[in-house]
Amino acid sequence: MTTQTSSQTPGWLAGLITTLRIAVGLLVVGVVFCVCANVFGRFVLNTSYSWAEEMSRVLFIWLVLLGAGLGSLERQHVAVTYFKDLAPTGLRRLLNLLAIAIIYGVCVCILLGFKELISGYTSATPMLGIPRTWLYSAMPVMAVLTLIANSLALIALFKKDRVKNNTPETPSREEEP
């Protein structure tokens, strides 16, 4: 796994990553609180909190999808690279481009599918009344974060190729007077 160091990360991206880390941390706290409240209610008070179950589900969905977007931005997703690492440089570059293209395609499908989903969707969660469009909007948020990460990976791939293809120029000698 590779991560970007702070010297390589632009300021806006570092701010976005920090914000996402805080949001994911708060979502973890929220899920833990809801689950603990429900466990306490069931085993100590002999009652179940339906709001806690529903809220933990909503928070967990956002947690997973924001975490996936954060993982994309930090290049922390698990990947099996054994065969890609054995491939020659040209094939490796082609495989990287193919992976980026597939990720772009999936993200575009998610965004187009979400547009169709919300066009006629008006229901809400049964207990808390949270609109399901808000619940499902975690998908396009994750897709946008992944598109940003994918675009940065594509730029880095082309920058790396440009650096490899540039030959260092020989310094010109100044004429002596």
Image (spheres, rainbow, N blue to C red):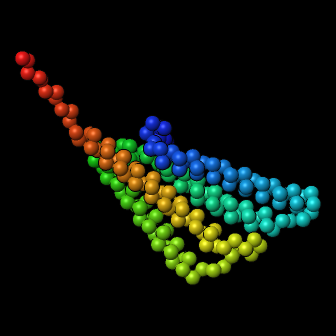
Q: In the current view of this chain or complex, which residue is farthest to the bottom? A: 120
Any part of residue 78 in sight: no
Residue plotted at (60% across, 69% down)? 136
Could you say which is closer to the camera, residue 166 or residue 12?
A: 12
Q: Where is residue 32 in the image (x, y as percent from the top left)?
A: 75, 53
From the viewer's perspective, tell me whether residue 12 is left or right of residue 23. Answer: left
Any part of residue 34 in sight: yes
- Please tell me in which quadrant of the rendered image residue 104 appears: bottom left
Residue plotted at (68% across, 54% down)? 27
Could you say which is closer to the camera, residue 48 or residue 159?
A: 159
From the viewer's perspective, tell me whether residue 57 is left or right of residue 71. Answer: right
113 lies above or below 158: below
Could you say which is closer to the camera, residue 129 or residue 50?
A: 129
Residue plotted at (45% across, 58% down)? 147
33 lies above or below 134: above
Q: In the current view of this chain or complex, which residue is farthest to the top? A: 177
Q: Position of residue 150 (x, y in %)?
A: 42, 54
134 lies above or below 95: below
Residue plotted at (77% across, 64% down)? 53
